[in-house]
Amino acid sequence: MVTGTHPEEVDLFDYVEGDLAEERRGELEAHLASCAACVQQVALVRAGKDALRESPPFHLPPAQREVISTSLRTQRRAAGRSVALSPKRLLVLLTPVAAVAAVVVALVSSGVFETNGNDGGSAAAGATSQLKTEDQAGGAEAAAPFMKVAGPATAVADELRRKGLAARVVGNSVEVRDATRGEVQQALRNRRAGRVEVVLIP
Amino acid sequence: MDDPDGQLVGRAQKGDRWAFEQLVDRHQHRLFTLAARLLGSPDEAADAVQEAFIRAWLGLSSFRRGARFSTWLYRICLNAVHDQRTKRPTAPLDEMAEPVDPRDQFVAHELSGALQQALAALEEEYRSAVVLYDVLGCSYAEIAELTGVAEGTVKSRIFRGRKRLAELLGTRTERE
């Protein structure tokens, strides 16, 4: 417990944390009563602790949260494989998909539209042998929007939730889980066409 | 050990991305705090957090049930932080773009403060120990698992890290 005439630092640490057994704490306090060096150490450790614990937590910016969702939505785990992909590499992978999506959006000029969930899936083919886009993987999670309605997105999600559907906002899209197209169309039948994309997540 | 994330992890391991999104919602801010305090840059921290969640999603099949998901996620984040540090640009931080989100500005302000400068001056092993323990509230056992050392060593690192930090903050205060 004691190195030379001073307590070990782990004992001093436990003392600062209030984790020292009563008997040992009494011994240590007796030592502190006559050791300015150890008193100084304890004071510094407490000051460092206070400075750290008073530091505020940070919040990931919402835009970054959306980037994570987009990243997750556009890839799929290979069975039994563990694959890491850097954000920059992901961007390279996503660029052709985004380009195709932009063309599709440009072609479907306005209003409510329907499109096949597999459209654009081949654009990323061959980017990596270990990853598949979700469209390539057979449309298990159809990332393509099938409706575009008037927003804002939060109001669309609220309306869907009020009608019993599981919906959440991701950027300017609303993801709806475990629902059919018919159910979503019925729920949003009174909403005009607009810019908020509605995406089905099986 | 009951893992509060257990149910969601089980669903996510079966391919339920919605469940994984909820795990991201739960852990995003703590991971960002960890990365920002270790890297000292909001932009680098955001990149590291994104990388960590992608790696976690892609590698979810390797997560062992019975372990704690948050500890596994922190381990991945620490690796992403390490990788981020190794590919740092040569341009000085003050030449990088100013953040526009008000909360970004808050983070940027905090990361330019005395505490962050003192943290940056600590040896890596001390910085990780104090951030994990005092900022994130991890247990000794968790930190020992994350850093691959005994719990006694964890305590020693926190002790020395706090002490050095206080010395650095004190020195700075005396100079001002």
Image (cartoon, coloured by chain):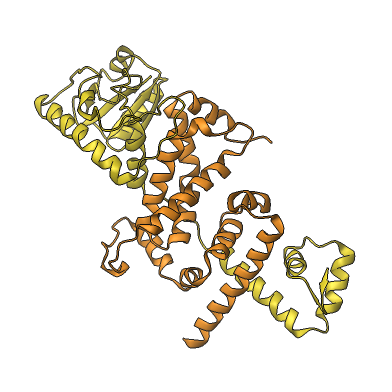
In the image, residue A187 above or below residue A85: above
Residue A84 is situated, as x and y percent measured from the top left of the image, at 40, 39
Q: Position of residue B70 (x, y in %)?
A: 56, 42
Residue B103 in view: no
What color was chain A assigned in the picture?
yellow
Chain with colour orange in the figure: B
For image coordinates 80% across by 79% down, the residue present is: A32
Q: Give the side of residue A74 with respect to residue A55, left or right.
A: left
- Most extreme residue toward the right is A23
Query: What residue sits 50% from the left and 82% below the top?
Result: B172
Q: Residue at x 30, y 15 (%)?
A: A181
Vertical position of residue A2 compared to residue B129: above or below = below
Q: Given the current orientation, which residue lies at the most extreme front position? A: A129
Q: How far from the left and from the top, in percent, is residue A6?
A: 80, 77
Tell me the quarter of the picture where residue B101 sits. bottom left
Which residue is more in the foreground, A6 or A49?
Answer: A6
Q: Is residue B166 left or right of residue A200?
A: right
Q: Residue at x 30, y 27 (%)?
A: A133
